[in-house]
Amino acid sequence: MAAGISTGVNGAVIQFPNRNQRQIGFERQELQKILDLYGRMVAAGEWRDYAMDFTRDVAVFAAFRRTAEQPQTRIEKRPALRNRQGMWALVGEHGQVLKRGHELAGVLALVERRLLKSVEA
């Protein structure tokens, strides 16, 4: 079912008001994986804040070391690239694409490895 649409009691489609249907977003399972990683990075002292942005082309989860800085890491979902390089991208602090792939877990693995290094040190 598309975002912003719900099925009523009689099976009728109900449109939620003030909801942009052309907006890209994270599915519940995707957001759960991202927030799980975020919680572990906060516990390790690496991240302190986050922001999310949803547009017609991309959904972005940005993690910050400090609130007033540029995001240390951005996790981007671009469904338009699904059949090319993969719709998931991990973008670094200076805008460089660190990893791109078709699966979220593969893209998050790079951050997971950094988390393991910071816990061991």
Image (spheres, rainbow, N blue to C red):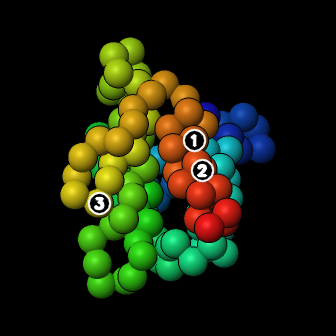
Give the camera-side residue of 10 and 114: 114
Q: Position of residue 94 (x, y in %)?
A: 22, 57
Q: Residues within 10 Å of mark 3 (few under 14, many from 20)?
A: some
- Residue topped by disc 3: 93
- For label 2, the crowd category at 10 Å Cα-Cα, with few meaning under 14, some 14 to 19 and many 20 or more, is some
Tell me the amino acid under the disc marked 1. Ala
Image point (33%, 48%), residue name: 91
Residue where numbered disc 1 is placed? 109
In the displayed structure, does residue 109 sit left or right of residue 20? right
Q: How many marks overall?
A: 3
Q: CA distance from mark 1 to mark 2?
A: 5 Å
| Amino acid, disc 3 | Glu
Foreground residue, 71 or 3? 71
Q: Quadrant of residue 29?
A: top right
Who's the residue at 40% across and 45% down the image? 90
**Can residue 42 be seen in this snapshot?**
yes
Quarter-of-image position of residue 121: bottom right
Outermost residue, right side: 9
Q: Are marks 1 and 2 in contact (CB under 8 Å)?
A: yes
Binning the other alpha carbons within 10 Å of mark 1 as few (below 14), some (14 to 19) or many (20 upward) gives few
Question: Marks 1 and 3: in contact by CB < 8 Å?
Answer: no
Identity, as a three-letter code, of the amino acid under mark 2? Glu
User: CB of mark 3 within 8 Å of CB of mark 2?
Assistant: no
Residue 112: which disc?
2
